[in-house]
Image (spheres, coloured by chain):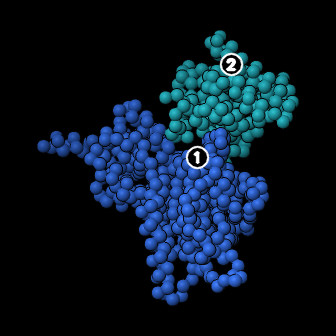
Amino acid sequence: MAKILMKGNEAIAEAALRAGGNNYFCYPITPQSEVAEYLAKRMPEVGGVFLQAESEVAVGNMLFGAAASGKRVFTTSSSPGISLMQESISYIAGAQLPCVLLNIMRGGPGLGGILPAQSDYFQATKGGGHGDYRLLVLAPSTIQEAVDLTMLAFHLSDKYRNPVMLIGDGMIGQMMEPVEFPEKYVEDELPGKDDWALTGAKDREKRIVKSLFLDPLALEINNHELYKKYELMKQNEARYECYKISAKNKVLIVSYGTMARICQTVIDELESEGVSVGLFRPISLFPFPEKELRKEILKKNVGTVLTVEMSMGQMVEDVEKVAAGAKPVKFFGRTGGIVPSPDEVKENIKEMIRQDAAPAKRTRKGK
Amino acid sequence: MSQYEVTFAGFGGQGVMVAGQLLSYTGIKQDKNVVWIPSYGPEMRGGTAYCTVVISDVRIGSPIISNPQGACVFNRPSFDKFSTKVKPGGLLLVNSSLIPATTDRTDITELLVPANAIAMEAGSVKAVNVVMLGAFVGATDVVDIKLVKAVLTEKLGHKKSMLDINLKVLDQSYKLAKQQLAQGQKV
């Protein structure tokens, strides 16, 4: 199929449809409303369900109910809307149901603003709702990757019977890029849904899908089951990409989403100025690619690790955990809807290198 | 590394977003990497609406461009905002029908295109964005003008009268830009 120019929001919507996501519940919010606009038109063509609810709280509960039927269900929203769904997300995770969620992040907290941000990293990766649970979290940096990861999200969600969340900053929703949809979405074999989906109990034993376990032992067993899945995800689903990683790198940047692309430009420009910097871009934020990042951080040539985010510093905590004191971890970010320019990031890195160089010189003088 | 960045800016309604999209579609036809980024936000109405298109032979890094090589400004607020941002050596294309000003900069090429006048003379002021697009392609040849025509025909084929107007002004402004550049003049 030829490449077509599509806005991120529309491309994600089309990708979801092609992955069999035929049950969509939503409530409009900038900057992702085009997903609903697109699906309002497209969903009837494939005979699916498009339902605009009265609120995001209702959307969450509709997802819970529809997911229990074993059908592929999804929603899209932006930060404040995702917050409203957290109760249901916790229930869906507790009841071990597949479900795909997209958060096109805008600045917060509260209603915040409508411009791009990456300040929902904590909410997505550490559990925005209550209880011991995790979402599988994927973060695209191009529209093509948003398409590919949306399709993958449905697959992983069924594979682990766990909600999968895609997070992209507002730019991912709003910008247009050429995309290509796979002719046919081929999947690995997935476990059947026959042993849990609620499909009508005629001629079989009744089933109950629930997250309520009043017997503490039963609840603890459920918690352990969930954590077994999260361990499996950690083993199998860590995804990342490296850019210009070499033995010459003095600085290693860790960045995701649109911010990582901006860092690529920074790295190209610094390279032409004789400064070697590499980029480690986590694609899965949970599981965080810990082992792989640790390997890069420990390389002898890497002096400093710099995390760049459109937030006050959230992923940087995971990077610090991985570095575990082996190398200094620094942070640069802008927030509130401001997207740092390549120049800004470049200046920050140059300043960092100057500062790193300064104390060493003083030490030599002291001797 | 071959990459070109251009910002189209004007009032909401002048078709600046579409101008950028037409350029992007053309870029894809030429097997280039393309990113189209709108200014989305509270400034969409009333103030300047703008979009930036990046066309590249290589993988596109930052979609955020602070200093584009080219800027096509459709109205005065856009002129004020973007004339200073064009990269040295770059191009500033001014809709002189609505902007009674020129830049003091000597490090860029400035072309004045009476875009509204050209569009109205051809039959519809709506074609103002295609006038600017034609002049931009004339001045830079970032994409093949024949492919711009093909894209226009695909997108407007169902409205023959509008298509004819747009194809006409595209040609006219493309040639105008070429003439101005050949004369090396700030008209």
Query: Which residue sits furthest left?
Result: A367
- Observer able to see residue A173: no
Q: Residue furthest bottom?
A: A215
Say if labels 2 and 1 share a chain. no
Q: Quadrant of residue B110?
A: top right
Quadrant position of residue A273: top left
Residue B177, labelled with which disc?
2
Chain bearing mark 2: B
Residue drawn where x is 62% and y is 43% of the image:
A179
Residue A339, relative to residue B120: is it above or below? below
Question: Would you call the spot at circle 2 few (<14 residues within 10 Å), some (14-19), or many (20 or more)?
Answer: many
Crowd around label 1: few <14 · some 14–19 · many ≥20 (10 Å): many
Read off the residue under disc 1: A144
- Pick out the residue farthest to the top: B183
Q: Position of residue B140 (x, y in %)?
A: 62, 22
Front of the two marks 2 and 1: 1
Chain letter of the blue region = A
Residue placed at 44% from the left, 48% from the top?
A: A241
Name the kind of residue labelled 1 in the image: Gln
Q: Is residue A301 above or below residue A324?
A: above
**x then y, percent, for residue A264:** 46, 41
What residue do we see at 48% from left, 46% from top?
A260
Q: Where is residue A39? Give x, y as percent.
A: 72, 56
Between the residue at mark 2 and the residue at mark 1, the CA separation in whole angstroms equals: 35 Å
Q: Is residue A359 visible?
A: yes
Judge whether A237 appears above or below A246 on screen: below
- Residue occupying the point 73% across, 68% down: A54
Q: Which tint is chain B?
A: cyan
- Would you say A52 lies left or right of B38 here? right
